[in-house]
Image (spheres, rainbow, N blue to C red):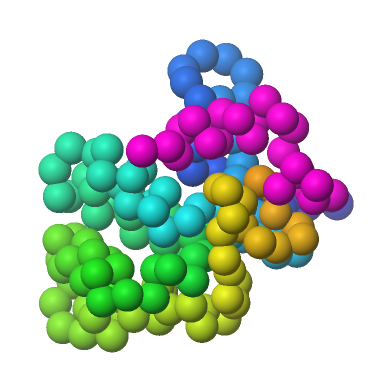
């Protein structure tokens, strides 16, 4: 029996038939590097109307980002506020701090250079063996641009 690896697909291209998602990170199986930088996560969530929709967007995207520049009190505060917006009560900062730490066990220290995570297996790196096709890389860049 063949099993499929589930992938995280945060980027919707549009409505219609056919493939409507572009896969940036792979969260199961072999790690292929984070799919979002912290600034990109903030931009995507910030496009949503109202605090509840922004929280509903930022929290599910959090596992897909990995970025050493996110290890800041502002990032902790943003994720902590998102969890409170959706009903969490105590310990939200303690929950958020490891999620934005540059010591994240899942990705480790990841620096971003020109919109690409500095990891050999990144789908966003054109030289990676797992690189997205050029058109999809351009689409991902356009969708995540401020």
Q: Against 86, is 3 above or below?
A: above
Q: What is the quadrant of residue 145 in the picture?
A: top left
Q: Which residue is drawn at 61% across and 41% down?
A: 23
Coordinates of residue 85 in the picture (x, y in percent): 15, 61
* Residue 73 visible (yes or no): yes
Residue 93, above or below 35 = below
106 left or right, relative to 134? left
Residue 83 shows in this picture? no
Q: In which quarter of the image is residue 107?
A: bottom right
Of the 4 image quadrants, the one containing the C terminus is top left
Residue found 39% across the figure and 75% down from its top: 71
Is 42 displayed left or right of 5 in the figure? left
Along the viewing direction, whichever of 5 and 136 lies nearer the viewer: 136
Q: Is residue 145 rendered to the left or right of residue 96?
A: right
- Residue lying at 46% horizontally and 33% vertically, measured from the top left: 143
- Percent from the top left, x then y, of residue 92? 22, 78
Q: Residue furthest top?
A: 16
Residue 115, percent from left and from top: 56, 48
Which region of the structure is painted magenta? 125-146
On screen, 58 above or below 67? above
- The residue drawn where x is 59% and y is 77% is 108
Q: Is residue 137 magenta?
A: yes
Residues 57 and 110: in front is: 110
The residue furthest front is 114
Q: Is residue 132 magenta?
A: yes
Q: How many marks?
A: 0
Image x and y of residue 52, in percent? 17, 50
């Amino acid at each position: 029996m063949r099993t499929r690896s589930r992938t995280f697909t945060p980027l919707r291209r549009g409505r219609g038939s056919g493939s409507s998602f572009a896969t940036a990170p792979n969260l199961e199986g072999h790690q292929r590097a984070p799919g979002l930088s912290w600034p990109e996560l903030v931009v995507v969530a910030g496009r949503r109307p109202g605090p509840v929709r922004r929280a509903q967007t930022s929290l599910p995207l959090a596992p897909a980002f990995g970025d050493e520049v996110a290890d800041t009190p502002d990032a902790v505060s943003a994720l902590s506020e998102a969890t409170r917006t959706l009903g969490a009560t105590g310990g939200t900062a303690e929950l958020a701090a490891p999620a934005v730490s540059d010591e994240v066990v899942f990705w480790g220290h990841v620096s971003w250079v020109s919109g690409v995570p500095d990891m050999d297996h990144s789908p966003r790196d054109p030289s990676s063996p797992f690189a997205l096709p050029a058109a999809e890389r351009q689409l991902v860049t356009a969708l995540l641009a401020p």
